[in-house]
Amino acid sequence: MASHRRPKPAGRARVSILTGVAAAAVALSAQSGAHADPTPTKDQVKEQIDQLNEQAEQATEKLNGAQAKQQELQKQVGELQDKVARQQAAVTEAQGGLAEIAGEQYRNGGISPTVQLMLSSSPDSFLSQAGAINQAGSTQSGALKDLQEQQRRLDQDRNEAQGKLGELEATTQQLKASKEEVQGKLAKAQDLYNSLSEQERQAMRAAEEKAAAEAKAKADAAKAEAKAKADADRASRDNTRDQLPAPSSPAAKPAAAAAAPSAPAANGSRAAAAIAAAESKLGAPYVYGAAGPSSFDCSGLTSWAYAQADVSLPRTSQSQATAGTNVGTNIANAQPGDLIIYRADRSHVALYVGGGQVIHAPKPGANVRYETASMLPISAIVRV
């Protein structure tokens, strides 16, 4: 029996397929447009650069710590290697004593098995035998005990030196990783900076220079105010002293009690010397891992500045955070010469100069300059 179903029109099927394809194309186009990254603004690029510089600085402080540890370990390894050499000489000398005993026995008719074994190519295995010394005579026993002790010290020194060499190797690898991390962050930051137009780069530089100039003006004003106050206090003391009657007898000496607070003056003197040293390096370039005298990173500048005041500071900002008395985080409590430690991880440090301003080595691509002390979150104010 013939079928009565009518065939579907071919034209309608083609239209349906084409409509579906077109809708899918529109959807894909819209989806692609939704996921396309818009061109970042100048402010967004600057924020990304600042983040990369911060990460680079954090890596730099890890690098500084690894370098300091490497130097200390190299020193310890050298000392241990010298100690091993001296101890080897002591073992050789002790073996020489046994050789003399052997010669004496040979001349008297023969060498005892104890001494023969002791002078064999494997004296360590002999020394491990508990009864060896008991089998020897009194002269042999003393020499054997001496050799046993010298050998024990030699083994101990060798093990310690080997351990330090392993620690040194691990630190060297850490140093390499930190250096690569710093270089990678700086390269990304430079690429972002290069993506800006020359006009945008000039605007960024101008803003930073303006902020630095304003900070310098405030720091200079604070120093002038402090000097004027010190001069006025000195004049007042001189005037008071001139008006005091001459003492009738040398019995009482109230002036000695007034002169007691001399320690703060000494601290102030060190602080002033450190500030003067840091100010002498204004304009010096930031270079990661550098500690002067021509370039600096943040902790390199503060440690170098205080070294000019005969004060030794640790090399990293984290270590400098514990190098003195912590007086909190309120900048109102800061005094000139204090170290201002920034960020929760203490990865940046600056030198407070007064008037709410600091001097510091800020970041790669920038020079040593003044800046407001509130530029970053403060984690500690340290009085050296």
Image: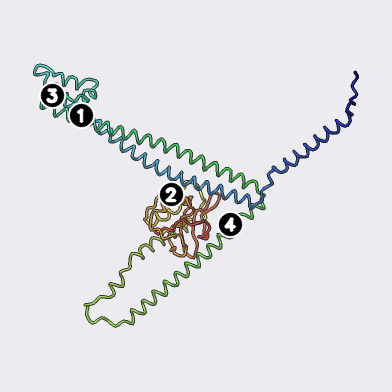
The numbered disc on residue 136 is 3
Q: Where does residue 100 sit, x and y in percent of width and height? A: 14, 24
Gap in angstroms between the C-alphas marked 1 and 2: 45 Å
- Helix, strand or loop for disc 3: loop
Which amino acid lies under the numbered mark 2 shown in the image of this protein? Thr
Nearer the viewer's eye, disc 4 or disc 3? 3
Q: Is residue 65 above or below residue 21?
A: below
Q: Is residue 380 left or right of residue 114?
A: right
Gap in angstroms between the C-alphas marked 3 and 2: 58 Å
Give the residue number, with chain letter if any, for mark 4.
208
Residue for point 39% across, 37% down: 168
Which amino acid lies under the numbered mark 4 shown in the image of this protein? Glu
The numbered disc on residue 148 is 1
Q: Where does residue 236 sit, x and y in percent of width and height? A: 39, 77
Gap in angstroms between the C-alphas marked 2 and 4: 26 Å
Tell me the crowding category of disc 2: few under 14, some 14 to 19, or many 20 or more residues within 10 angstroms, Cα based.
many
Asked if the residue under mark 3 is in contact with the one under mark 4, i.e. CB atoms within 8 Å, the reply is no
Q: Is residue 239 left or right of residue 295?
A: left
Give the residue number, with chain letter if any, for mark 2.
316
Asked if the residue under mark 4 is in contact with the one under mark 1, i.e. CB atoms within 8 Å, the reply is no
N-term-proximal mark, 4 vs 3: 3
Residue for point 10% across, 25% down: 137
* Residue sitting farthest toward the front: 1
